[in-house]
Amino acid sequence: MRLTPSLLLAALLPLFAGCQMLAEQPSDPNVGTTRMQGELSAANGQLLFKPCSEARRFVVKDAAGTGILQEAANLASGPKTTLFADIRGRLAGSREANSDGQLDVTRLYRVEASASACEDPNFKQLTLRAGGHAPDWDIKASGKGMVINREGKDPLPLPFLEEQMPGGGLSLSSEANGQRVELWVAPQRCVEPGTGAVRHLRAELRIDGQALKGCAYYGGARDN
């Protein structure tokens, strides 16, 4: 049977549609990467990363322009400063001396001067942590709800609804007990005043007619 142009086009339409669906599928930037926490140190002009509870050290390479090298340099106030980093990246072999390989960093969640962050018992259960100053406030969110701590007030545990916002942000809201509470976070570099700690999210808490600003980061229970 001879196919006319119209029949040939009709036969190929499903193929074109399938190709278009494949082409439109977004690529996941996290494929092949792992989220890790550990300590940063400098040696021989290089930045090294030691995962929590490990002895191995990896040479840090900024593979995605995260700014981790400059952030670490800004926070290192002395040669004995212990820096903690929460990052995502790929481990690879390396010929560098005095190292166990190379860490290609693709995302920076936070970096701070701390000798105890690796021992945080709550990190793996949290989906989000946010906080700010003047006045001091702090929010810990998990699969069980969120707890709001504010200066001069008792802890306030609340259930919440989470919504994805355009541009990669999140909204956590609650209307429990007739009180409207909203936490907005957006992907933007945020520096905590006083400590200089760097977070990957900017936050705003709206409660009791106030808008309290601060910084935030994803907890260990959220793998993105």
Image (cartoon, rainbow, N blue to C red):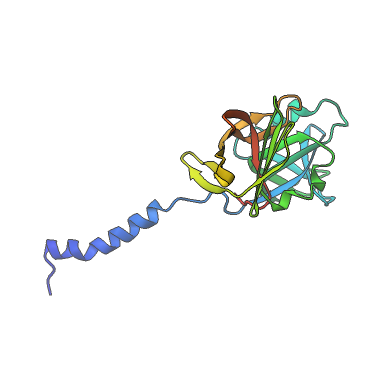
Q: Answer yes or no: is residue 174 visible.
A: no
Going by the picture, which residue comes out furthest to the right?
Answer: 80
Picture coordinates of residue 102 (x, y %)?
72, 46
- At which x and y percent is residue 110? 69, 38
Task: Tell which of 169 and 29 is nearer to you.
Answer: 169
Residue shown at 79% from the left, 50% from the top: 121
**Residue drawn 23% across the image and 63% down it:** 12
In the image shown, does 98 or 117 lie closer to the viewer?
A: 117
Q: Quadrant of the N terminus?
A: bottom left
Q: Position of residue 105 (x, y in %)?
A: 66, 42
> Is residue 10 shown above or below 106?
below
Which residue corresponds to the image point at 66% horizontal and 35% vertical from the top-left?
Answer: 199
The quadrant where residue 175 appears:
top right
- Which residue is painted at 72% across and 52% down in the image? 124
Seen in the image, is 207 located left or right of residue 140?
Answer: left
The image shows residue 84, relative to residue 23, as above or below, that is above
Most foreground residue, 7 or 2 = 7
Asked if residue 212 shows in the view, the reply is yes
- Is residue 30 shown above or below 12? above
